[in-house]
Amino acid sequence: MLNRKFHAKVPNEKWVTDVTEFMYGNGQKAYLSAILDLHDKTIVSYVLGHSNNNPLVFL
């Protein structure tokens, strides 16, 4: 949808998300889903969870 156009002229025009996996403790995993505003590269929101699934991204 963005067609590699990762710049936004105004705030809240384009948001993107990604999920990062973290290993901790005794082989446990945590997943961080952050939402980034492409206008000024600020984090709009984030969710931390123990499973990498759709509700993690859609919250």
Image (cartoon, grey):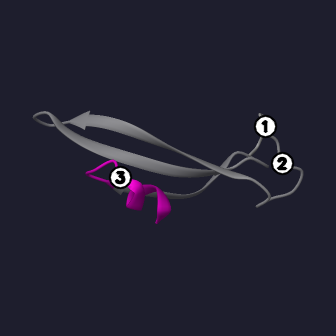
Q: Identify the residue shown where x is 10% and y is 34%.
A: 26
Residue type at tag 1: Asn
| x, y percent for residue 54 | 41, 56
Badge number at residue 8: 2
Q: Is residue 26 above or below residue 10?
A: above
CA separation, marks 2 and 3?
A: 28 Å
Instruction: Report the span colored magenta.
Output: 49-59
Number of other residues with Cα within 10 Å of mark 1, as a class: few under 14, some 14 to 19, many 20 or more? few
Badge number at residue 3: 1
Secondary element type, mark 1: loop
Secondary element type, mark 2: loop
Q: Identify the residue shown where x is 14% and y is 33%.
A: 27
Badge number at residue 53: 3
Residue 11 horizontal side relative to residue 45, left or right = right
Q: Is residue 50 above or below residue 12?
A: above
| x, y percent for residue 41 | 70, 45
Q: Earlier in the sequence, mark 2 or mark 3?
A: 2
CA separation, marks 3 and 1?
A: 25 Å
Secondary element type, mark 3: loop
Dots 2, 1 in contact, CB < 8 A:
no
Residue type at tag 3: Asn
Badge number at residue 43: none
Q: Is residue 42 magenta?
A: no
Residue type at tag 2: Ala
Dots 2, 3 in contact, CB < 8 A:
no
